[in-house]
Amino acid sequence: MRTSLYIIITVSLGIMVSYFFLPESLSTMVDTLINISLCVTLFFVGISIGRNKHLFKDLKKTGLKVLILPGGTIIGSLIGGIVTGFILNRSLTLSLAIASGMGWYSISSGIILPVAGAEGATIAFIANMFREMLTFLLVPIIAKKVSPYCAISIGGATTMDVTLPIIARSTNDYYALIAFIHGSIISLIVPILVSFFSSL
C-alpha cells in the first residue's frame, strides 16, 4: 500500500513539474531519460536475479507450468475485452483487438489505426496505457493481499520491461524471473492477436 502511495505521489509530481515548469525545449529529452533509467533499473533487476544460483533450478522444476500464467493472462484479457465491449456497445472484433494489446499501447494502436481509424487507435492507446499505469499502482497490493501470480498477470506484456522493477520489488527474485518470461511470451503473441482480430 505504501509503495502504491509513493507511485501516485511521484507520478503526480511529475505531471505538475512537466505542466508548469518544464521548458518545451527539454521535453524531447524525457523519452531518452526514461529509456536510460529503465535500462539501468532492469540491469540491476537482472543482477538480483542472476546472483540467486538456486533460482534457475527452481524454475526448471516448474517446467511447462510457467506457460500456464501467460495463457491465463491472454484468456482473461480477451474475456475482459468482450465484457467491456458489450458494456460500451463496441464491436466485438475491435474490443478483442484492443484487449489483445495487453498493456503494449504503442504496437496495438499502431496496428489498429489503419483498420479502425484514429478513434479505434486512440481507444487502444488509452486502454493499454491505463493497464500499464494500473499495474504500477495495483501490483504491490495484489502481490501482498492476493497472489504474486495475479500481480504478474495484470501487467500483461509490460512485465518483461516497464513493470518488471515494481514486480521485483513487491515479490522476490523467483517471481521477477517468472514475470520476465511471462512478459516475453505475451510480447511475442500480442502483434499476432491484435493483427488477427483487427483483420476480422
Image (tube, rainbow, N blue to C red):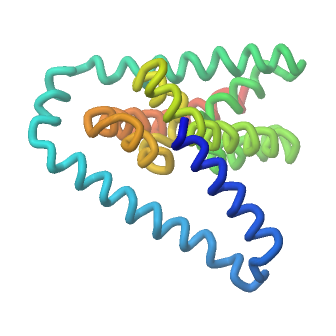
Q: Nearer the viewer, residue 128 or 169?
A: 169
Q: Is residue 140 visible?
A: yes
The residue under the point 10% across, 35% down is 54
The residue under the point 48% across, 21% down is 145
Quarter of the picture holding the N terminus: top right
The residue under the point 86% across, 22% down is 90
Quarter of the picture holding the C terminus: top right
The residue under the point 40% across, 33% down is 182
Q: Judge whether 177 appears above or below 64 on screen.
A: below
All told, the count of numbered labels is 0
Residue 137: x, y in percent?
60, 39
Q: Is residue 191 visible?
A: no
Q: Nearer the viewer, residue 139 or 115?
A: 139
Quadrant of res 195: top right
Whether residue 25 sits left or right of residue 180 in the image: it is right
Q: Nearer the viewer, residue 5 or 18?
A: 5
Residue that extends furthest to the front in the rendered view of this protein: 2
Whether residue 103 sits left or right of residue 182 in the image: it is right
Q: Judge whether 182 appears above or below 15 on screen.
A: above
Whether residue 155 sits left or right of residue 134 in the image: it is left
Residue 129: x, y in percent?
68, 44
Residue 61: x, y in percent?
15, 21
Residue 149: x, y in percent?
41, 23
Quadrant of res 28: bottom right
